[in-house]
Amino acid sequence: MRRLIGAALSVWFLVGGLAVVAEACGGVTATIADDPKALGGKERQDHRGVSFYQLADGSVLLPASAVRVESGLAEAIARRYLEKTHPKYGHLEFEGFTYDHGDFVYMYHAEVPGLAEGVHVGPLAYVTSHAHVHVSAITGDVYGPGCGIGSGIVVMRFDPKAYPAELKGKRLPYRQFDSHFVIRDGNPPVIDGRIEPAEWAGAARMVVEVGPAKETMTEYG
């Protein structure tokens, strides 16, 4: 059984098919799996000895038994960090769950008025008005932005006493890398940081739910 951060299985239609699993600077898409062995893949271990499974497409499965911080607590951690560092932050949004720079992290971003944070993807540097926060599913620590807006250094250690006990084990209905749009096949955009009207003409958004909205499900397709 495999779940996308506690949500019903969803499929996002992007350019020419499903989302690419590789992320910036070596990170890959990760999924929490109740029974990763049933889905195949090669068993591996991270630097802490946490076992996970790598599939043929490069994505990875983290056994649910290894998760110490579920999404409900992770979001509370992200909000606490933002309240300390950017108290005027705007809407907090979940991006995705990844295996990134040696850890399994929930990725969030929030718009911060007046923020001009410098980030880089390899040699390309730019400025963003969004604060990027990554919360470890293993330790609960918060990472600041690193290469490719991936995980950087630890900026806040997890303090379990700072959070209500009812958040432990709470899962939220997150959507993994929800693109918010569908692009017509044969009309791929140029990923250059600009939104050109011709590239996105006729775009729409579609989320297809497969099966009941439960915490666990069988993966299809």
Image (tube, rainbow, N blue to C red):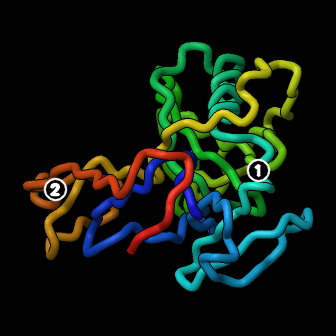
Q: Nearer the viewer, residue 47 or 128?
A: 47
Q: Tell me residue 191's x, y (percent).
A: 33, 63
Classify the position of the C terminus by image quarter: bottom left
At 51% across and 58% down in the image, what residue appears? 217
At 16% across and 56% down in the image, what residue appears? 200
At 57% across and 85% down in the image, what residue appears? 56
Q: Is 12 on the left-hand or right-hand side of 96?
A: left
Instruction: Give the label, 1 or 2, closer to the camera.
Output: 1
Categorize mark 2 by other alpha carbons within 10 Å: few (<14), some (14-19), many (20+).
some
Q: For the view shown, which residue lies furthest in the right direction?
A: 48
Q: For the view shown, which residue lies furthest in the top direction?
A: 88
Residues tagged 1 and 2 counted as in contact (Cβ below 8 A)? no
Q: Which mark is residue 67?
A: 1
Is 149 placed above or below 102 here?
above
**Which amino acid is tagged 1?**
Val
Element at label 2: loop
Q: Tell me residue 182's x, y (percent).
A: 22, 57
Q: Nearer the viewer, residue 127 or 107?
A: 107
At 56% across and 64% down in the image, what residue appears? 29
Give the image quarter of residue 161.
top right
Give the image quarter of residue 36.
bottom right
Classify the position of the N terminus by image quarter: bottom right
Residue 162 shows up from this direction: yes
Categorize mark 1 by other alpha carbons within 10 Å: few (<14), some (14-19), many (20+).
some
Q: CA distance from mark 1 to mark 2?
A: 38 Å
**Which amino acid is tagged 2?**
Trp
Image label count: 2
The residue that disc 2 covers is 200
Point out the tag, 1 or 2, that comes first from the N-terminus: 1
Q: Is 145 on the left-hand or right-hand side of 218?
A: right
